[in-house]
Image (tube, rainbow, N blue to C red):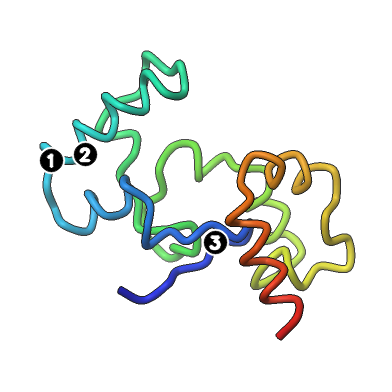
Protein backbone atom coordinates (compact mmCIF):
# COMPACT_ATOMS: atom_id res chain seq x y z
CA UNK A 1 0.00 0.00 0.00
CA UNK A 2 1.17 3.50 -0.81
CA UNK A 3 2.32 5.66 2.08
CA UNK A 4 0.18 8.64 3.05
CA UNK A 5 2.43 10.79 5.21
CA UNK A 6 0.56 13.15 7.49
CA UNK A 7 1.95 16.60 8.28
CA UNK A 8 3.35 15.24 11.55
CA UNK A 9 5.11 12.28 9.92
CA UNK A 10 2.64 9.51 10.74
CA UNK A 11 1.73 7.17 7.90
CA UNK A 12 -2.07 7.33 7.63
CA UNK A 13 -2.02 4.21 5.43
CA UNK A 14 -0.96 2.22 8.50
CA UNK A 15 -3.60 3.69 10.82
CA UNK A 16 -6.25 1.17 11.92
CA UNK A 17 -9.02 3.78 11.59
CA UNK A 18 -7.93 4.67 8.06
CA UNK A 19 -7.69 0.99 7.09
CA UNK A 20 -11.12 0.19 8.53
CA UNK A 21 -12.64 3.23 6.81
CA UNK A 22 -11.14 2.38 3.44
CA UNK A 23 -12.28 -1.24 3.70
CA UNK A 24 -15.84 -0.07 4.35
CA UNK A 25 -16.04 -2.47 7.30
CA UNK A 26 -18.27 -1.10 10.10
CA UNK A 27 -17.33 -3.99 12.41
CA UNK A 28 -13.63 -3.16 12.01
CA UNK A 29 -14.35 0.49 12.80
CA UNK A 30 -16.18 -0.57 15.94
CA UNK A 31 -13.28 -2.83 16.99
CA UNK A 32 -10.79 0.02 16.54
CA UNK A 33 -13.04 2.43 18.44
CA UNK A 34 -13.42 -0.10 21.28
CA UNK A 35 -9.63 -0.53 21.51
CA UNK A 36 -8.99 3.20 21.37
CA UNK A 37 -11.67 3.99 23.99
CA UNK A 38 -9.49 2.06 26.42
CA UNK A 39 -6.05 2.98 25.07
CA UNK A 40 -6.77 6.71 24.97
CA UNK A 41 -9.19 6.86 27.92
CA UNK A 42 -11.88 8.19 25.59
CA UNK A 43 -15.16 6.53 26.59
CA UNK A 44 -17.10 8.84 24.24
CA UNK A 45 -15.29 7.60 21.12
CA UNK A 46 -17.53 5.95 18.55
CA UNK A 47 -16.94 4.12 15.29
CA UNK A 48 -18.41 7.12 13.47
CA UNK A 49 -15.96 9.48 15.16
CA UNK A 50 -12.93 7.65 13.74
CA UNK A 51 -14.02 7.44 10.09
CA UNK A 52 -11.05 8.88 8.23
CA UNK A 53 -9.67 9.29 4.72
CA UNK A 54 -6.27 10.41 6.01
CA UNK A 55 -4.82 13.62 7.35
CA UNK A 56 -4.26 15.05 3.90
CA UNK A 57 -7.93 14.64 2.96
CA UNK A 58 -9.49 17.80 1.58
CA UNK A 59 -12.57 18.74 -0.44
CA UNK A 60 -15.07 16.51 1.28
CA UNK A 61 -12.58 13.96 2.60
CA UNK A 62 -13.54 12.57 5.98
CA UNK A 63 -11.37 13.13 9.03
CA UNK A 64 -11.54 11.36 12.36
CA UNK A 65 -12.70 13.77 15.05
CA UNK A 66 -9.23 14.04 16.55
CA UNK A 67 -7.54 14.61 13.20
CA UNK A 68 -10.03 17.36 12.38
CA UNK A 69 -8.99 19.28 15.49
CA UNK A 70 -5.26 18.42 15.45
CA UNK A 71 -3.19 21.55 16.15
CA UNK A 72 -0.25 20.25 14.12
CA UNK A 73 -2.45 19.68 11.07
CA UNK A 74 -4.09 23.09 11.47
CA UNK A 75 -0.70 24.80 11.73
CA UNK A 76 0.65 23.05 8.61
CA UNK A 77 -2.46 23.98 6.64
CA UNK A 78 -2.27 27.60 7.83
CA UNK A 79 1.38 27.78 6.76
CA UNK A 80 0.62 25.96 3.48
CA UNK A 81 3.19 23.26 4.31
CA UNK A 82 3.17 19.84 2.67
CA UNK A 83 4.77 18.49 5.84
CA UNK A 84 6.18 19.80 9.11
CA UNK A 85 9.55 18.56 7.80
CA UNK A 86 9.70 21.58 5.49
CA UNK A 87 8.71 24.21 8.04
CA UNK A 88 11.19 26.92 9.05
CA UNK A 89 10.05 26.31 12.64
CA UNK A 90 10.64 22.55 12.43
CA UNK A 91 10.54 20.82 15.81
CA UNK A 92 8.52 23.63 17.40
CA UNK A 93 7.16 22.90 20.88
CA UNK A 94 3.84 21.65 19.48
CA UNK A 95 5.49 19.17 17.13
CA UNK A 96 8.23 18.17 19.56
CA UNK A 97 5.66 17.26 22.21
CA UNK A 98 3.96 14.94 19.72
CA UNK A 99 7.20 13.45 18.37
CA UNK A 100 8.28 12.50 21.89
CA UNK A 101 5.43 9.99 21.77
CA UNK A 102 5.87 8.96 18.12
CA UNK A 103 9.47 8.07 17.25
CA UNK A 104 8.47 6.56 13.88
CA UNK A 105 6.93 9.89 12.88
CA UNK A 106 10.15 11.69 13.87
CA UNK A 107 12.15 9.27 11.71
CA UNK A 108 9.87 9.90 8.73
CA UNK A 109 10.16 13.68 9.10
CA UNK A 110 13.93 13.45 9.41
CA UNK A 111 14.06 11.37 6.23
CA UNK A 112 11.97 13.98 4.41
CA UNK A 113 14.25 16.75 5.64
CA UNK A 114 17.34 14.88 4.45
CA UNK A 115 15.96 14.18 0.96
Q: In the shown orientation, is residue 6 left or right of residue 63?
A: right
Q: Position of residue 108 (x, y in %)?
A: 62, 66
Q: Which residue is mark 3?
A: 6
Quadrant location of the C terminus in the rendered image: bottom right
Q: Spatial distance from mark 2 to mark 3, Cα to Cα? A: 20 Å
Disc nearer the start of the sequence (3/1):
3
Q: Position of residue 50 (x, y in %)?
A: 34, 39
Q: Is residue 114 above or below residue 100?
A: below
Q: In the shown orientation, is residue 107 left or right of residue 57?
A: right
Q: Which disc, if any, is residue 29?
A: 2
Q: Within 10 angstroms of label 3, few (less than 14), some, or many (20 or more) residues?
A: many
Q: Is residue 13 above or below residue 3?
A: above
Q: Position of residue 81 (x, y in %)?
A: 71, 70
The local secondary structure at tag 2 comes to helix
The local secondary structure at tag 1 comes to helix
The local secondary structure at tag 3 comes to loop
Q: Quadrant of residue 85?
A: bottom right
Name the outermost residue toward the bottom. 115
Q: Spatial distance from mark 2 to mark 1, Cα to Cα? A: 5 Å
Amino acid sequence: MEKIIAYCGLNCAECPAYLATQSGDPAALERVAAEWRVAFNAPEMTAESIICDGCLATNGGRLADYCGMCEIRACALERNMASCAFCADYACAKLESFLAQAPAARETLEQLRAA
